[in-house]
Amino acid sequence: MARTNADQLHGTLDMLVLKCLDNGPEHGYGIAVRLQQWSADVLRVEEGSLYPALYRMERRGWIAAWWGTSDNNRRARFYRLTPAGRRQLRAETESWQILSGAVARILEA
Amino acid sequence: MARQSIWSRLFGRRTRDTAVNDIHAELRFHEDRLAERLEAEGLPPDRARAEARRRVGNQPLLQDRALDAHGGRWLEALVQDLRYGARRLRRQPGFAAISILTVALGIGANAAIFSVASGVLLRPLPYPNADRLVMVWMDNQRLKLREDWHSWPEIDDYRTMSTSFEDIAVFNAMARTITGSGEPERVIGAHSSPNLFSVLGVQAAKGRTYTEAENTPASNGVIVLSHGFWQRQFGGRADALESTMQINGRAVRVIGIMPEGFAFPNANTAFWMPTGPAEAQRTNRNSLWLQSIGRLKPGVSVATAQADLARINAGNAERYPNQRGYGVYVIDYLTQLVGSVRTAILILLGAVACVLLIACTNVANLLLARATVRDREMALRAAIGAGRGRLVRQMLTESVLLAGLGGLAGIGLAWLGLQALIAAAPADLPRLADIRLDRTVLAFTAGLSVVTGLIFGLVPAIQVAIGDPNRALREGGRSATGLGHAVRRGLVVVEIGAAVVLLVGAGLMVRSFNAIQHVNLGFEPDGLVTGRVTTYGERYAQGPARALFLSQVLERAGTAPGVAGAAAIGDLFLSATPNSTIFSIEGRPDFAPEDRVEVPVDAISPNYFSVMRIPLVKGRFFDTRDNAEAPAAVIINTTMANMFWPDADPIGRRIKYGALSDTGPWMTIVGVVGDTRRTGFEAAVRPETYLPHAQSPAGSMLLVVRASGDTGRAIGAVREAARATDAAVPLQAPRTVDELVGGLTAQRRLNTLLLAIFGVVAAALAVIGVYGVLGYSVAERTREIGVRIALGASRGGILRLFLAEGMMLAGIGIAAGLGTALALSRAITSLLYQISAADPMTLVAIAALAAAAALAACVIPAIRAARLPPTHALRSE
């Protein structure tokens, strides 16, 4: 793996954002709304974390951005997954599953 | 957002603003949508807006964090690196001071010499389109003198027939006595054709320059003043214009003042007057009295102009057979001015580049040694997440910071050095006034500092980049990587080699200078003082009056206390183009034009040779018998006797100036005297003739006085003698002959001194380098030494081991240096005197010196190694 994030929370947020964009391009607000809905309102993404994460991943080439038009005809910045982002998502999903499986087994023991 | 280019990420202020605007717009969109939703969920609009703003958060802070993640923070990262680097340097003040001082020496020397190069060689001359200005010389093949003067008609032909020149102007410098208010003053001025100013492209700042109508002997009583002379003589008053001055007793009208900084042909030229050639001068092709400067048409090369004039010249040689052997030589004006020092400056630039190379090498070695120690720190930083690129950048930032500080200190050193250099430089160094630390030099120095930092930082940075962090952590930072080891040794070889090259150059220059110091001048300069007296005006219109004046001055001066003898000659040291003439020998046919030799014409007082202690070879000196009524007498030098009477006695033979058909009197050779070096140390001695002043009473004479004690007192006595004889005749430019001789060698002395200084600095740095590397090697191999001693190696053996290691490096470096010096020998040959650039004695001496210095540098670390207590060595971790 090319880079690891010291901060596991960063990594988790990154993974969730990547997963979200795996369903198709979305703007920042849309990502926040979608993550909140999918987690059934359990997770509320802080805007203060979301945007730095988006820029960080853009710089790493996992996601790409452009200015487009939103559903209510306003200018919005859209993000989509790049092939590198897709690979990153796969890798992070795998390691997350191993980790969460391990944690689950410990808790069930 | 589109991907940013590296460049805009690094420097783009605009790009950064765009990024901030983008982020702002994006967050604004988010906030709007959130507010709309909250409102749809039932909140009142103002509360919905407030809640949305709270959730999206402190926008500036968020922008800041977003930007950080965005990568628009290169500068901030740089500042961070710089802070970190500065902190490290502060923690190691010894290392920092040594490195900065080393770099400062290297960069300071470069900045100083580059200032000279920039001012003298690179800056354009202060004339519009100065690159089109060329000097047009007469190539005197008879005298092997490529820069001789022209006759008026020859230049006139070039002006009218050439297709390459816009115009050609003629001029000659002269010294004149200004009288009027106060002390009479001798000043240097120039006669010129009126078109000199248009050729140079400079107009009068006040008033006007002279016209063609004023260029005749009857009408040339007008004068244009330099800015400096106007300030000095008239206090810069506007009423100087149209006022009248007395020049050599003649009234002339001031018609113009040139702009400040205009100085042609010399820095001290104070005024210009029309040449005003007499009718005879306008047609006489044998009277060579003019220098000429031309302006080429746009796009014409010097070579084209040369070919153009050579064609006209060939036609003239056809038409006027006595012009054969008088060619033409065109050279661009900048080269003319600075050509003599160009080689020296380039060699000095090479020398300081060597010094800087050595300085770089030393600092690189220090950094390398530290980098080995720092392996651990770097590995640690890599382990906690610093990228390799980031570490390399950190290392480079540190070395550039170091170099930058060294550069700052170097500019200080350069400034000091330049003051000393300008003070020590001979006053006739071309364009001396143009040498200064200007923006060009500062920019050069800044660029050089950065490059220097990158160069000496690169090696340790590469080591970090390819080093294995895990190994470094495991080995506790004790091991040297193989790379560092080999590179350090290589660097030492390079710096010893560079130092040897410099030392060889300096050694050759010192030997040349020494050779020149021992050249026999042909007279004894100790205690001789000189000063010029020039009679002028109605009172001295007749020769006997001038002869009387001189004999009275000499009698007064010769009997003054503190004076052993007083004599006079037209000029002691001669320029390459002294006042000279062809001559004929009685009983022999005229010389063919190509065989003609010119001899300087010098009137002397009878006692000249005895005062100068020039030996009489044959015949007699002049005495009071050789007066105006007696038959014309002449004394020749040994070179002339050998050249024209190789197998016969010249005494009693007769010669005359000019051709056989000329009307001058026959002069009987009464004596042959020893040769004197009057055209400098490096030119061959010319055939010379001396005439008795009583028979040839020149108006301007150089008094030559031998002091019996203090030379200052003798100068005072001469001044008093001149004043007592005629208060209107000033004693001009009193000097000791030692000063004059020093002036002849001043430029060489400076070159030699500078090269020697750089050589010594280079050698000192190289010695420090050898010492440092070997010392580090000892520290690094402490454990190995312990093992060797434990296994029975003697202390002598250890000593020899390290000495051998150091001396092997020194040997390779010295050999490489000698080889390089030989390969470069052609560059310095033109600066040497009577010595070959491959002079074996110099090479051997320098090699021995370098080896001795290297040995000295090796001894201390080697002894330290040999004295290590084995227990300590073994325990060392």
Image (tube, rainbow, N blue to C red):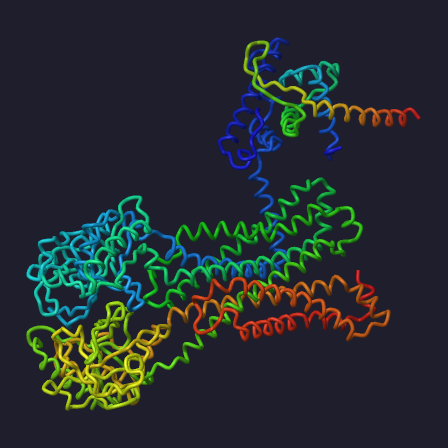
Task: Give the quadrant of the N terminus of chain B.
Answer: top right
Q: Which residue is drawn at 41% across and 80% down?
A: B518
Residue B188 image point, x, y percent: 21, 66
Which image quarter is the C terminus of chain B in? Answer: bottom right
Left or right: residue A31 compared with residue B623: right
Q: Residue at x 7, y 78 (%)?
A: B542
> Of residues B724 and B79, which is closer to you in this image?
B724
> Where in the figure is residue B808, as x and y percent of width and height?
69, 67
Residue A6 placement, left or right of B700: right
| Residue B536 seen in render | yes
Which sits in the foreground, B501 or B749? B501
**Residue at 35% in and 68% down:** B426
Q: Which residue is drawn at 29% across and 69% down?
A: B143
Q: Where is residue B242 in the image (x, y as percent from the top left)?
A: 9, 57
Q: Residue B771: in sight, yes or no?
A: no
| Nearer to us in this view, B694 or B675 | B675
Relative to B190, residue B308 above or below: above
* Picture layout, residue B535 above or below residue B231: below
